[in-house]
Image (cartoon, rainbow, N blue to C red):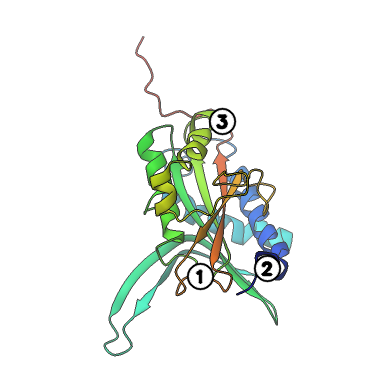
Amino acid sequence: MMSPVDWFAAFPIQPATEAVEALRQGWTELAGRPRPDFNPKTKEDGLTKRLKVYVENHVARERGLLGMWAAEDIIGDVDPNTGAMLEERRTDIVYGWNDDVRGMKLVFEFKRLGRQKKHRDHYLQDQGLGRFVTGIYSRKEAVAAMVGVLLDPEPEVVPPIREALQDAVLATFLRLRRLPSGLPYARPSAMFTGADFDTEHERDAALAPTHGTIRVSHFFFAFGYPTTTRKQKSA
């Protein structure tokens, strides 16, 4: 089995970083002011489709990125005997890149995030981060990304997510690998300067890369103006 040092040295960190920075730039530009079709009330798939197209058409060209962007990319399994789909999922945004010796498909899973526990659970459990652990997202990939779209101020949303990761039941479900410090996350991120923290998860052999784990970097994107899910008090 490849050691953590070996896989990290082999991972194409520069193309991954370029993709991350392009996505962050695209978000900053699109979310900088209220837009009728790109705002806190826009559904997740609407945000990701528009962001992918904007990054592909403008930011990636400006930055000279040569990889392929996709939104709502279909993944799954097919029964070779019948041709039937055994499982089907769609990833929000993926950046694919390869050279003669290496390749990657960097998946970005987006979740709209308010301060409520239900939002936090959606982000951390089987419809969110769990897809990179027990689901088929990023199969055989070493790195993936969760992106929380902040609907409330960051201090009301992100610290409770880090705190929730210390729950023993959730940590077991997510198959979290703890650091020597005992924490279930690395902060700051060891992968990307723009990420708030990283988590590392054990995966079954059929889903895992050769070293056995996947590292997920967690990003939190804010709109360029105040947003809140709190109901406004009537005068």
Query: Disc 3 marks which residue?
Result: 225
Classify residue 231 as left or right of residue 64: left
Quadrant in the picture for residue 116: top left
3 and 2 marks in contact (CB < 8 Å): no
Distance between mark 3 and mark 1 Cα atoms: 40 Å
Horizontal and vertical percent position of residue 105 = 56, 69
Horizontal and vertical percent position of residue 192 = 67, 52
Residue 128 makes an appearance in the image: no
Mark closer to the observer (3, 2): 2
Answer with mark 1 or mark 2, whichever residue precedes in sequence: 2
Horizontal and vertical percent position of residue 93 = 51, 60
Query: Disc 1 marks which residue?
Result: 208
Q: Is residue 71 above or below residue 186?
A: below
Amino acid on which the number 3 mark rests in the picture: Tyr
Characterize the local packing of mark 1: few (<14), some (14-19) or many (20 or more) Cα atoms within 10 angstroms: many
Tell me the element at label 1: loop
Answer with mark 3 or mark 2, whichever residue precedes in sequence: 2
Amino acid on which the number 1 mark rests in the picture: Ala
| Location of the C terminus (image quadrant) | top left
Tell me the element at label 3: loop
Q: Residue at x 50, y 66 (%)?
A: 138
